[in-house]
Image: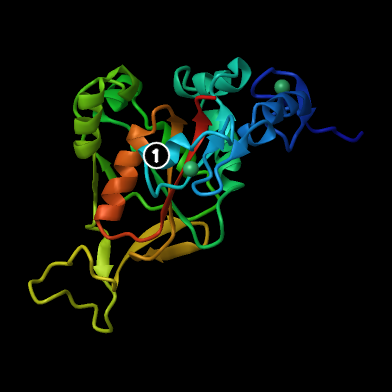
Amino acid sequence: MAIKLINRCIYCGELTSVRRRICPECMERIRRSRLDSFLDFCPVCGFPLVDRLYSCPNCVRHPGMKTRLMLSYKDPFARSFLELYKFDGRKEFSRFFADLLSECIEAGEVALPVPSSNASLKKRGWDQMDRISKDLKCPVARLLVNNYTGSLQSKEMNEKERIEFSRDKFAVDLSPLRPCGKDGSRGKDGCLGARSRRAEAQVSGLSGKQSVNFDTPLVVMDDVFTTGSTMFAAYSVLVASGFSNVRTMALYGEF
Ligand SMILES: [Zn+2]
Ligand SMILES: [Zn+2]
C-alpha cells in the first residue's frame, strides 16, 4: 500500500502536502497582505507609497536608505504570523519568514540581521532575526552589535529620545574583518583601519565561506519597520564605518 505523505499547515492545522509548511489557502491570504499587491513604490528608495502625488516619507526622513518592506503589519492575519513566531515562540515560522526575505535577495548580497536588544533577549531568551537568518538562502554576516540597554520601544519615544537612541543604538563589529593582503599582514599600527578597502571578513553562507569587504552589497534585515529609526540607526552606523553598498529590508511595514 502506498503511503501518502501529508503535513499540517503550521498556521491553521489543515492537512496539506508534505513539502508545504503553509497550506494554499493561508498562502493566498498572505499574498493579499503583501504590500506589493496593493501599494506603489518610491522609484528612488523603494519604500511603499499610499499616494505617489506626495513626497516619499522615507526619502525625507532617511535620505539615501533604500528600503524594501514585505507584509502589511496592519493586516491582522499577516501580523498574527509574527506574533505566533515572536511572542509564542513558534520557531517553525522562521523558514516562512526566511523564504519571504530570500525572494528579494540578489546574487552577491550578504544579509545582516538586526540583533535584538539585551532587554528583549532577556525577556524572550532568543533572537528572532538571528533565528530567521539561519534559514536564509544567502550568506549572513553578524557585524551589527546592539548597544541599547534601555527598555523603551522606538515607538514609545519622543523625537529627542529617538535621535539619541538612533545615535547610540548600534555599533559595527569590525573584529571579524581581517586584511586580505598577500601575506595576510595587518597595517603598520597592527590594527585594521575601518576604511581599509582591503579588509575582509569570513561570513557563513550556503556556499561555505564567503567574504565581506567594504564594497560588498549588504542587506540589513529586521522584523517590523515602524518609524524606521531602528533601521536608520543600523544603516547609518554601517555607512559611517565605511560600507559603501547598504540597503534595508523588513518583514512588515506599518501599512
Ligand atoms: Zn493553513
Ligand atoms: Zn523614497
Q: How is the image coloured?
A: rainbow
Q: Is residue 10 left or right of residue 143?
A: right
Q: Residue at x 46, y 23 (%)?
A: 86
Q: Residue at x 49, y 37 (%)?
A: 55
Q: Please identify the residue farthest to the left as the structure is shown.
A: 189
Query: How far from the left and from the top, in percent, is residue 188?
Result: 9, 77
Q: Alpha-carbon neighbours of circle 1 within 10 Å: few (<14), some, or many (≥20)?
A: few
Q: Is residue 206 above or below residue 79?
A: below
Image label count: 1
What amino acid is labelled 1 in the image? Answer: Val
Residue nearer the viewer, 150 or 65? 65
In this picture, residue 129 sits left or right of residue 75: left
Can residue 130 be seen here? no
Query: Taking the image as drawn, is residue 42 in sight?
Result: yes
- Residue drawn at (34%, 40%) of the image: 232
Q: Quadrant of residue 151?
A: top left
Of 60 and 104, nearer the camera is 60
Q: Which structural element holds mark 1?
A: helix
Name the foreground residue: 70 vs 200.
70
Image quarter where the C terminus lies is: top right
Residue under numbered circle 1: 60
Image quadrant of ligand 1 equals top right
